[in-house]
Amino acid sequence: MKAAVGIIANPESGRDIRRLVAHASVFDNMEKVSIVERLLLVLQDLGVEHIMAMPETFGIVPGAVNAIGEHLSMEVEMLPMRIFGDWRDTYNAKRAMKDRVGVIVVIGGDGTNRIVAKACGDTPIMPISTGTNNVFPYMIEATIAGEAVAAIAMGVVKVHEGTHRTKRVELFEDGVLKDIALIDAAATLHSFVGSKAVWKPEYLRELIVSRCSPSNIGLSAIAGVLREITEDDDIGLYLELGEGRVIKAPIAPGVFKKVGIKGFRELELGEEVEVKTSPSLFALDGERETEVRGEIKAKVTRNGPRVIDYRKTLRIAAERGFFED
């Protein structure tokens, strides 16, 4: 069986309203083309024979293929699927790739990875950051990412050796799983989705995070000021916002806001917390997504996607002579 890798590149990541309401940089789609170019060349050099890619409105992967030209000998298959130009493309592409690729490279932000996580099952992913306020994906050079992806796809490093299972926040309505977030889920007083991005802390009421740090940007930075929780820690954090201790946190690039903390506590993995704000429009990984009207409960679990630990993978691959001629 040929070693195969999937590529999901989101043309919309790094281009939302936070360029207007904050000071976020624009991540140009031509740079995403360049990222894919480097990925394809490295994967080809290290023995990957087949690529399955998501078609999208900009043509990121076809642009990379055209730029490489005759130097590309591997098969690049664009999935035969309808293009909607929204989250459905990401979700449908992941489902189409299921059991047909050894690794999926996700080029996008927290939101893109969240959609992939809803459909990826046990297929490991390599998340490369190109969005805004990103906590989940790596800020990594595509060449290094490609080396680690190839090591897993070629079987030099086994999935159980070079990946880890990540955490996620699970949101339940009347006992039924409603949606998930990889990093943070916030109950808000917003009445409609609109531009999705959340930049007004006065609309926030409750926050559940799987990980947080004062070095983050976004809603998880609010929790991170109070307590740092890493991906390896088997806990999460619940915050109730309102009158009380006042902190300042970077909730968007270049934007510090005052936030009142009424109280907070640790959550053990699997421990349910009742969300008081109902009905509520939930912001998941920084984007207004899900309206909930019934009884709301949330918990942090380790049911997130498998993510390649590129440092560990590359160390094992080097020890096994993967990079020797």
Image (cartoon, grey):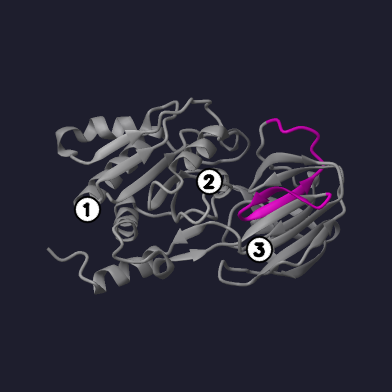
Question: Is 28 drawn above or below residue 140 in the view shown?
Answer: above
Q: Secondary structure under badge 3?
A: strand
Q: Are marks 1 and 2 in contact (CB under 8 Å)?
A: no
Kindly identify which residue carries mark 2.
116
Question: Is 125 drawn above or below residue 74 in the view shown?
Answer: below
x and y, in percent, of residue 251 in the image: 65, 50
x and y, in percent, of residue 259 in the image: 76, 54
Question: Is 15 drawn above or below residue 114 in the view shown?
Answer: above
- Kindly indicate the quadrant of the structure image that contains residue 208: bottom right
Q: Secondary structure under badge 2?
A: helix
Q: CA distance from mark 1 to mark 3?
A: 36 Å
Q: CA distance from mark 2 to mark 3?
A: 17 Å
Question: Which badge, 2 or 3, comes first in the chain's sequence?
Answer: 2
Three-letter code for the amino acid on which mark 3 is drawn: Thr
Camera-side residue of 67 and 104: 104
Question: Which badge, 1 or 2, comes first in the chain's sequence?
Answer: 1
Camera-side residue of 131 and 50: 50
How many marks on residues?
Answer: 3
Q: Tell me, yes or no, whether the highlighted magenta stretch contains residue 52.
A: no
Label ID, residue 65: none
Label ID, residue 47: 1
Give the magenta range. 174-194
Kindly identify which residue carries mark 3.
301
Q: Is residue 99 left or right of residue 219?
A: left
